[in-house]
Amino acid sequence: MEDTSLITLQPGQLLARGVSRHLRSHGYVSIEEFVPARGLRVDVMALGPKGELWVIECKSSRADFQSDNKWQGYLEWCDRYFWAVDTEFPTELLPEGTGLIIADAYDAEIIRMAPEDKLAPARRKKMLQKFATDAARRLHRYRDPKLLPMPDEEDSQ
């Protein structure tokens, strides 16, 4: 039986799905299209079992990667930074000193662990609260789709 839920997803969203599945097998939970700060939106923000925060940017093609000029701004919002790409992606394009995940719509594998650069305690607290708040709001909207957004939700979308 064909999985028709994948038909409407974009290539990067398919990678994010596989990445999130893989991270879950390691005890991580994740949110896709997470906004750590105004003007930034990461493809996957993952929260680990010890409170670690990882950012994973999913790139479906060379052009997708080359058009991304914001990725370095994401480094200050996580403990580790990864790229997730498919098996056809030219991985030599990816910057040194970043993690590498090979993924598809169903699973992923961490090929190169990203170096750790721990968040400051105040930033970590802020990010954990934002992660929890965004996750709760998404669940609430899922349960009650006609719910009007709260005034401060505009930046979280």
Image (cartoon, helix red, strand yellow):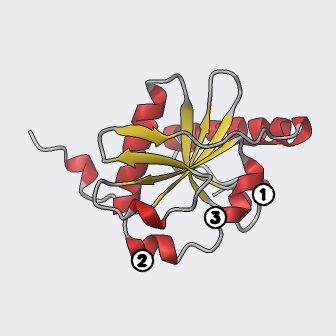
Q: Is residue 136 left or right of residue 87?
A: right
* Number of residues whose C-alpha sits closer than 10 Å to that of mark 2, classed few (under 14), some (14–19) or many (20 or more): few
Query: Is 37 located above or below residue 129 in the figure?
Result: below
**Residue beneath label 2, please?**
63
Who's the residue at 51% across and 37% down the image? Answer: 143
Asked whether the viewer can see residue 119, the reply is yes
Q: Helix, strand or loop at disc 2?
A: helix
Which of pointers 2 and 1 indicates the residue nearer the eye?
A: 2
**Residue beneath label 3, please?**
71
Task: Specify the amino acid type for callout 1.
Answer: Pro
Residue 14 in the image: x percent, y percent? 35, 52
Whether pointer 3 and pointer 2 mark residues with C-beta atoms closer than 8 Å, the reply is no
* Number of residues whose C-alpha sits closer than 10 Å to that of mark 3, classed few (under 14), some (14–19) or many (20 or more): some
Q: Helix, strand or loop at disc 3?
A: helix
**Residue beneath label 1, please?**
151
Task: Specify the amino acid type for callout 3.
Answer: Trp
Task: Specify the amino acid type for callout 2.
Answer: Ala
Who's the residue at 48% across and 70% down the image? Answer: 65
Asked whether the viewer can see residue 10, the reply is no
Q: CA distance from mark 2 to mark 1?
A: 36 Å
Work out whether residue 148 or residue 110 is closer to the camera in this orientation and state it: 110
Q: Earlier in the sequence, mark 3 or mark 2?
A: 2
Q: Earlier in the sequence, mark 3 or mark 1?
A: 3
